[in-house]
């Protein structure tokens, strides 16, 4: 069930007026923090600062140009470093797309399913260890041909939140059940943004999602409370 709508933005959207976006009813902004080897998006800082100042919930994504697992893990380190400047908890998404694969091919690296999954796992491991919420940007083709989500979750020992891109009027109940965010169009019109912008439907309210580390600490805390109660009794 849809919780709310939001947008995702990068330098390609120019100067975004986050207040007008918020006032138009969009309740979360996903911001490109950067791409590749520590290239911070030119509009990340003003976009992030505006979200913080206006108490607009946010998340970030990092566009991958990784050629191996180590590079993917490093990209996560860069993403976490940017997130930590503004939020102690937020979704951080790994974004591997057609441009990633084309970039790698031109450098003699073929990214197939094994590589794509390994890169995503390496990235999300860092996100989880830093206490942030793991998010995977993907689409129907990539779920079929590049990402086996259950295997990846088993490798991580952790649920992966899915940001699902499919530009149609609607998605099936099965698709909706499997994703946390549906990116439904790249041609949205939103007050505060010049030109087209991506619009997302959120089926998970990330403000209520504990980070993996917080979940672990909560479990440990509950066990300690139970042990204390037993001793007291």
Image: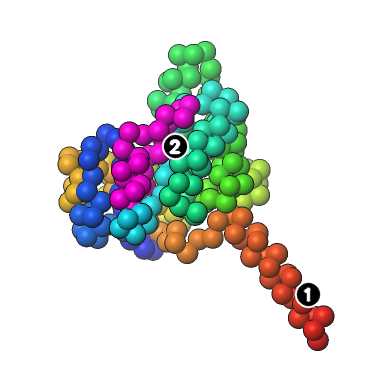
What x and y, as percent, mark residue 209? 50, 61
**For numbered disc 1, what is the local secondary structure?**
helix
What x and y, as percent, mark residue 62? 44, 37
Question: Depth check: 194 or 140 in front?
Answer: 194
Residue 177 falls within the magenta-colored stretch: no
Question: Depth check: 139 or 157 in front?
Answer: 157
Question: Depth check: 27 or 99 in front?
Answer: 27
Query: Is the residue 27 above or below the residue 42 in the image?
Result: below
Q: Residues within 10 Å of mark 2 (few under 14, many from 20)?
A: many
**For numbered disc 2, what is the local secondary structure?**
strand
Across the whole image, how many numbered discs are drawn on residues? 2
**Left or right: 156, with 134 as reference point:** right
Q: Residue at x 49, y 13 (%)?
A: 107
Q: Are marks 1 and 2 in contact (CB under 8 Å)?
A: no
**Left or right: 228, with 125 as reference point:** right
The answer to whether any part of residue 136 appears in the image is: no
Query: Is the residue 127 above or below the residue 74 in the image?
Result: below
Question: Depth check: 190 or 182 in front?
Answer: 190
**Left or right: 41, with 137 as reference point:** left
What x and y, as percent, mark residue 140? 43, 40
Q: Residue at x 40, y 59 (%)?
A: 203
Can you tell which mark lies on residue 62?
2
Q: Which residue is mark 1?
A: 227
Q: Residue at x 44, y 61 (%)?
A: 207
| The residue stretch that appears in magenta | 29-51
Q: Residue at x 81, y 86 (%)?
A: 233
């Amino acid at each position: 069930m849809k919780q709310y709508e939001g947008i995702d933005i990068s330098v390609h959207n120019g100067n975004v007026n986050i207040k007008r976006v918020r006032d138009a009813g969009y309740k979360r902004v996903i911001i490109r923090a950067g791409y590749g080897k520590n290239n911070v998006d030119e509009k990340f800082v003003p976009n992030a600062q505006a979200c913080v100042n206006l108490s607009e919930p946010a998340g970030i994504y990092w566009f991958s140009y990784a050629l191996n697992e180590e590079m993917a893990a490093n990209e996560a380190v860069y993403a976490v470093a940017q997130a930590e400047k503004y939020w102690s908890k937020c979704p951080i998404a790994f974004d591997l797309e057609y441009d990633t694969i084309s970039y790698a091919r031109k450098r003699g690296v073929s990214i197939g399913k094994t590589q794509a999954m390994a890169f995503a796992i390496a990235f999300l491991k860092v996100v989880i260890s830093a206490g942030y919420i793991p998010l995977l940007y993907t689409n129907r083709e990539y779920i079929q041909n590049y990402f086996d989500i259950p295997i990846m979750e088993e490798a991580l020992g952790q649920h992966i939140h899915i940001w699902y891109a499919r530009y149609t009027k609607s998605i099936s109940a099965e698709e909706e059940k499997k994703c946390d965010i549906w990116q439904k169009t790249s041609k949205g019109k939103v007050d505060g943004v010049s030109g087209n912008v991506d619009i997302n439907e959120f089926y998970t309210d990330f403000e209520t999602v504990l980070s993996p580390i917080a979940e672990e600490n909560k479990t440990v805390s509950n066990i300690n409370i139970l042990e204390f109660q037993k001793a007291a009794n």
